[in-house]
Image: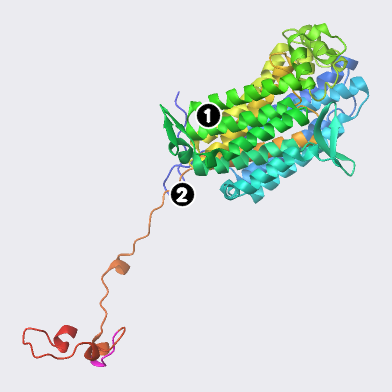
Amino acid sequence: MTPPAPAPDRRGGMRKRTGRLAEFFLLVMAVVIAAGAWGLIHYNRDGELPERWWVVPAVWGVLVLVAHIFIRWRVKYADPVILPCVAVLGGIGLAAQHRFDLASSTDVTQNQVMAMAFGVAVFGVILVWLRDYRVLQRYPYVLFTFGLGLLLMPLLPLIGTEINGSRIWISIFGFSFQPAEVAKIVLTLAFASYLADRSEVLQTAGKKLGRFTLPRLRDVIPVFIMFAAGMVVLVFQNDFGTAMLFYGLFVMMVYVATDQLAYVIGGLVAFAGAAWVIFQHASHIQVRIDSWLRPFDNMDQNGQIIEGQFGMAWGGLFGRGWGLGSPTRIPLVSTDFISAGIGEELGLVGLVAVVMLYAFIAARGIKASLAVRDTFGKLLTCGLSFVVVLQVTAIIGGVTRLLPLTGLTTPFLSRGGSSIVANWVIVAILILVSHQARRPVETFEPFVDLEMEATATIDISGLLEDGVGPRVAITDQLAPVDDPEMPQAEEVAT
């Protein structure tokens, strides 16, 4: 059965479908899933639903509807799948935080809802204010300096704060903020702008070494700066995940811009060598590696990893069910180990479903990067999609012991206002670029007036009679001569 053809517009062309109706129905399903998860928690724990259980799911539904209205108003050709995936993840995250609040008598959910509301507001402001994302390409060095400043800000003595062994926070007037969440967006913009202008130079300029081209030093200085900044973060902030995220992001974007595998190989070798040197002298990195390889050798030191492993093993394939497990036995289950809590109560199937939602967001972002026409848009969308992939891979890989444990957050699930707002900014930029990629190309038909195209005749006899020309009089310029073969002034004028 063939799909129906697009309806013709009033100009006789074919009107492209925007996908907004499909997005609306997907959002309805996402809100239903969030409300079902919220209700199941109370039903499984208490056997009944409380009187006002529907309030938070309704608030989440309103926030999702507001985001949908912004898309319909400003970017109607945007990708229809990204926002529904975010809505499902956000709804599951709110339900999980509520489940942890009930078990540990905390009140994290209220702050999470406020952070979601602020994130949706920022999402709308970006869609309204940033009509054309390409204006951000003008300031690569400003963005690069600002991003590095944000990344290194926690090292300042007055505002830098160490929490849970990692110095990645700043505290101002009683509010804690993680600047690396904003830095990952700013640096992605800076990388995309820089590489969009120099992709051809990096491919062709420089000395040849067999099949590869060695770039000029002045073209790769930002690479060395990023490498040094990543090592500083790794050593002084005790944050292996942030260092891996930013360095992996830049190596990937260089590869996308140049299509040369040598940059990837060289970047990985350089990072591995530096990490090995730091491993020999940094005790906290040695602890992370030992906890990854031999967690059961030290029960006191690795209690978080051990509880997470037992929780997911207890959940099995289909989980214990919302509200029927014991996820709060895991330290920091609402932040770093929220995927372990979800794996315990939703099982391996539920955890894989959550990972697939992230995969859909990244895949739709990469699809937009392939369809958009400008190089900056391609690099920006691909970079932000890879940020999501790296972040989810690092944190869930650490929780499941596929990788050493890092301190990154799980987007839209983990507790933390800075992480939620930053990820809504990423979604807004992906939406903007996908709108430019999917919008139909306007066919331009120039208007031709045949009467205006006719040859016009200008009468200059009056000018010639008065002896006036555009610069000097003709009689002053052409004097009569005696040569009979030379034309006279009157003949030349005629």
Taking the image as shown, residue 480 lies to the left or right of residue 191, namely: left
> Which label sits on residue 263?
1
Are there few (<14), some (14-19), or many (20+) residues within 10 Å of tag 2?
Answer: few
Q: Answer above or below: position of 4 versus 465.
A: above
Please state which of residues 117 and 276 is positioned toward the viewer in this rendering. 276
Taking the image as shown, residue 459 lies to the left or right of residue 393, namely: left
Residue found at x 45% / y 34%: 5
Magenta part of the chain: 465-469
Q: Position of residue 171 (x, y in %)?
A: 86, 40
The quarter of the picture where the C terminus appears is bottom left
Q: Quadrant of residue 307?
A: top right
Cα distance in 3D space between marks 2 and 1: 51 Å
Provide the secondary structure element on which disc 1 rests: helix
**Residue 105 located within the stretch drawn in magenta:** no
Residue found at x 72% / y 26%: 241
Question: Which colour assignment does the render follow?
Answer: rainbow
Please state which of residues 33 and 140 is positioned toward the viewer in this rendering. 140
Query: Which three-letter amino acid code belongs to the residue tagged 1?
Result: Tyr
Please state which of residues 483 and 207 is positioned toward the viewer in this rendering. 207
Instruction: Say whether disc 2 or disc 1 marks the residue closer to the N-terminus.
Output: 2
Name the residue tied to disc 2.
10
> Which label sits on residue 114?
none
The quarter of the picture where the N terminus appears is top left
Taking the image as shown, residue 444 lies to the left or right of residue 75, namely: left
**Is residue 106 in sight in this rendering?**
yes
Disc 2 vs disc 1: which is toward the camera? 1
